[in-house]
Image (cartoon, helix red, strand yellow):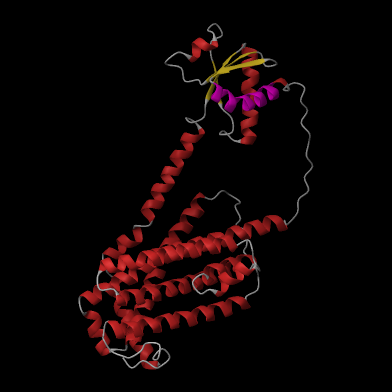
Amino acid sequence: MKELLRAASVIARRDFTAVVLSRTFILFLIGPLVPIVIGMVFAGFTQKISSTDLRPVVGIAMAPADVGALERAHARLTERMGPQALPRLHAVPLGTPPRTQLARPDSDVVAILSGTVSRPVLTGKPEDLDRLQGDLSLIASAAQAEKVLHMVKVERQEVATSLGAQSQARLLIGRTGQIVIFFLTILLAGMILSNLVEEKTNKIIEILAAAVPVDAIFLGKLIAMLGMSFVGIAFWGATAFTIFMALKAPGTVLPDPAVGWPAFIALGIIYFAMAYTLLGSLFLGIGAQAATVREVQTLNMPITMGQMMIFFFVSYTVDHMGSPLEVASVVFPFSSPFAMIARAAQDAALWPHLVAILWQGVWVALIIRIGVLLFRRHVLKSGGRWWKQLFRSSTG
């Protein structure tokens, strides 16, 4: 065992330095940030459009006093409801009939509100009237009640905590933890496949197999890729934290998960490592059987789709803690890391995490062992029945 770990550490250092010290690794680190920045810019641009240009414009053909009352009511309502909740108002001349104003090619109004505040008349296409009638009725009612409406004062009674709000916040933290671990795993685990197939094509893997046990090769590659993943996660995490601290509103306080933030972050790192090694060891076994990149892509697709189905299943069980489906997601090894990080957000008990991590580790060792035996049988053309050698010690 000691020799196996020593050989695995040699392979891990070799692969880790080859990946991290390469020029392409910088592009690998920057690559995921580019679509995020573009998405943020696009989201801000889209929000600006939706809050201004895409809101329908209603022309107000009324006396100046009524126009002022409607505009003041509109301002009061949008202050509480948000600028996107109501259509924009625009005063139009009184002398031109509403039908004529709507027929003008340079007009940007979709409907005309005429008459008075107490008896408004809305002119427009049927679908526009259906969409705007309720909003304009609300604005006119607020304008008519401007002088007689008395606001009811709501008394405040503050509490330190709200269990309902806390439960919802922890549920959201659990879902977010699942999403982060899932996307990082899918993004990073596939690199193991390409690395192994490249070395098989160049006959390097056979040379390594002649020098060190195949178990050490698989374990070393898995450790190296996991270490490289942690380098990327540290860079992306520091960038995300910097952006969050720069953009967060003053006084913003994140809700605490059930186990607390230090334990939750530590468990998140551990469960990412377990999810990565579970999927990575499976990819290693697949890559050991594939001879070309095309075969890898063919075999990679069903594994990825299966992992997505598992993730959707686990996402459903987040708010069903203790149910048979949630317990099944905890026991099944490939869904266990995602289910347990959600539990960490909602349940303060720590002993189930120790049991789950040990259980996941057993499956990682088992999958690596099966992959090694299949590699020996189909690539190195050595060994007998793989299931008979499953629990025997490796000799190289």
- Residue 394: percent from left, percent from top: 36, 92
Q: Relative to the observer, which residue lies in front, 56 or 153? A: 56
* Quarter containing the N terminus: bottom left
User: With respect to residue 149, does 30 lie above or below?
Assistant: below
Q: Relative to the observer, which residue lies in front, 393 or 370? A: 370
- Residue 204: percent from left, percent from top: 22, 80
Q: Quadrant of residue 300?
A: bottom left
Q: Residue furthest front?
A: 385
Q: Quadrant of residue 97?
A: top right
| Residue 279 seen in render | yes
Which secondary structure dominates the residues rendered in magenta? helix
> Count of labels shown?
0
Question: Which residue is drawn at the image coordinates 53% and 81% (left, top)?
Answer: 358
User: With respect to residue 166, does 275 lie above or below?
Assistant: below
Q: Position of 359 compared to 212: left or right?
A: right
Q: Relative to the observer, which residue lies in front, 127 or 161? A: 127
* Quarter containing the C terminus: bottom left
- Residue 280: percent from left, percent from top: 39, 73
Examine the structure image and report whether residue 196 is included in the region drawn in magenta: no
- Residue 290: percent from left, percent from top: 29, 73
Question: Which residue is drawn at the image coordinates 60% and 68% (left, top)?
Answer: 326
| Residue 9 seen in render | no
The magenta span reads 126-143
Q: Residue furthest left?
A: 202
Question: Which residue is drawn at the image coordinates 62% and 78% (left, top)?
Answer: 351
Q: Relative to the observer, which residue lies in front, 320 or 109? A: 320
Q: Position of 309 compared to 70: left or right?
A: left
Q: Quadrant of residue 13?
A: bottom left
Examine the structure image and report whether residue 127 is included in the region drawn in magenta: yes
User: With respect to residue 385, does 14 lie above or below?
Assistant: above
